[in-house]
Every structure is written in C-alpha cells, then in structure tokens.
Image (tube, helix red, strand yellow):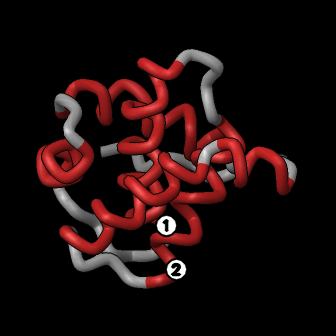
Amino acid sequence: MYSARDRVDNEEWLTRIERAADRLSLGAEARSYASDMFLSEVPDEDRSKRAVAAASLYAGALIAGEERPQSRVADAMGVSRLSVQQHWKPILESAGFRPPSW
C-alpha cells in the first residue's frame, strides 16, 4: 500500500500515466488501477520509474478489460516493449491478481 505522500512525491509520473492513458483512450477504471499499482510498486531509482509506470498502465488496462498491445503502451510511455514485458506480471501478482497464462 502507499501513502498520500507517495502520491505527492510521484505526481509527475502519475501525470505521465494519465497522458499515456489519453493517447491510448483508456477509461477511468484502467487509469485508477494503473496509478494504484504504480504507487504500490514505485522504485527508488528514477530511471526505473518509467518502465514501472508503463507496466502498471498495461496491467491496469488488462484488469479493466481494455487490453492494449504492449508495443502501444510502451510507445505511449516512451519505453521499449521489453520494459513492459519484463515488469507487468510481477506488478499484477503484487496487486493480488493472477496473470494470464498466454
């Protein structure tokens, strides 16, 4: 879980998630899941935050039933598809969800 301070400290990244969600035409539920998962998993190193934010957005879209290709999410967040691929399953599991087996 995260604190209100985490939200304030990571406002820039939450804004980036929102902008990418706009580009992907994602709804409020996917955005909410993405933000919550990002704040629960936010890494200490700034260079890792972009990948975790992208993976959180991908995972949030999956949970909300608004799946988007990893490559589109990666493009919207400015990371490689591999970054999304490497991080989304652990983020889902940490949030208490079982990742699909495909």
State left or right for residue 71 relative to residue 4: left
| Residue bearing the label numbered 2 | 29
> Mark 1 or mark 2, which is nearer the start of the sequence?
2
**Residue 35 in picture, x, y percent from top left:** 57, 58
Q: Do the residues under discs 2 and 1 have CB atoms within 8 angstroms? A: yes
Q: Residue at x 63, y 34 (%)?
A: 42
Amino acid at circle 2: Glu
**Residue 68 in picture, x, y percent from top left:** 22, 62
Within 10 Å of disc 1 (Cα), the crowding (few <14, some 14-19, many 20+) is some
State left or right for residue 4 relative to residue 49: right
Q: Residue at x 30, y 45 (%)?
A: 102
* SS at badge 1: helix
Q: Quadrant of residue 47?
A: top left
**Residue 96 in picture, x, y percent from top left:** 71, 50
Amino acid at circle 1: Ile
Cα separation, mark 2 vs mark 1, equals: 9 Å
State left or right for residue 53 relative to residue 11: left
Q: Is residue 74 above or below residue 28?
A: above
| Residue bearing the label numbered 1 | 63
Label placed on residue 52:
none
